[in-house]
Image: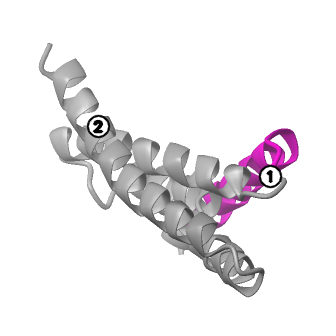
Amino acid sequence: MKDILLVFIGGGLGSALRLFLNKIIPSEGFPYSTMTVNLIGSFLIGFIISYLIHHNMLKSDYYYFLVVGICGGLTTFSAFSLENLNLLKSNDIVQSILYVIISVSFCILLAYIGFILMNKILNY
């Protein structure tokens, strides 16, 4: 039950942060705000997971609050999917392909960079 509460609180905070970022990042013609929150969340998840693994805290309260809750609430695959659908419906094929390539490749890259960066910090 404690895990559910941690995910609930973290998810609310992550979602509120996503809403804040969506309001300050313009997204006219291209879904920059969703891409930005997904890139930030991907970096954070790699960074946090590296820390948790290093300290043998994977599946701890921190995992549920930070990774599942905050990062899960911050990032949004459903908005990514809807925005791609809207780009395709508007015949913006190039924009849609660009959005998919940038989002997927850079999110994975940033998760990796976050993971490696935390490993370097912890082993410094």
> Mark 1 highlights which residue?
27
**Secondary structure mostly taken by the magenta-highlighted segment of the chain:** helix
Q: Nearer the viewer, residue 40 or 61?
A: 40
Residue 63 is situated, as x and y percent measured from the top left of the image, at 40, 55
Q: Nearer the viewer, residue 54 or 71?
A: 71
Residue 107 is situated, as x and y percent measured from the top left of the image, at 41, 53
Q: What's the coloring here?
A: one colour
> Does residue 13 show up?
no
- Circle 2 residues within 10 Å: few <14, some 14–19, many ≥20: some
Residue 120 is situated, as x and y percent measured from the top left of the image, at 18, 23
Residue 33 is left or right of residue 101, and the answer is right
- Name the amino acid type tagged 2: Ile
> Mark 2 highlights which residue?
113
Q: Is 18 drawn above or below residue 68 in the view shown?
A: above
Q: Nearer the viewer, residue 34 or 119?
A: 34
Q: Is residue 11 magenta?
A: yes
- Name the amino acid type tagged 1: Ser
| Occupied quadrant, residue 79 | bottom right
Q: Earlier in the sequence, mark 1 or mark 2?
A: 1
Q: Residue at x 34, y 48 (%)?
A: 111
Disc 1 to disc 2, how far (Cα)? Answer: 26 Å
The segment highlighted magenta reads 7-27
Q: Is residue 24 magenta?
A: yes
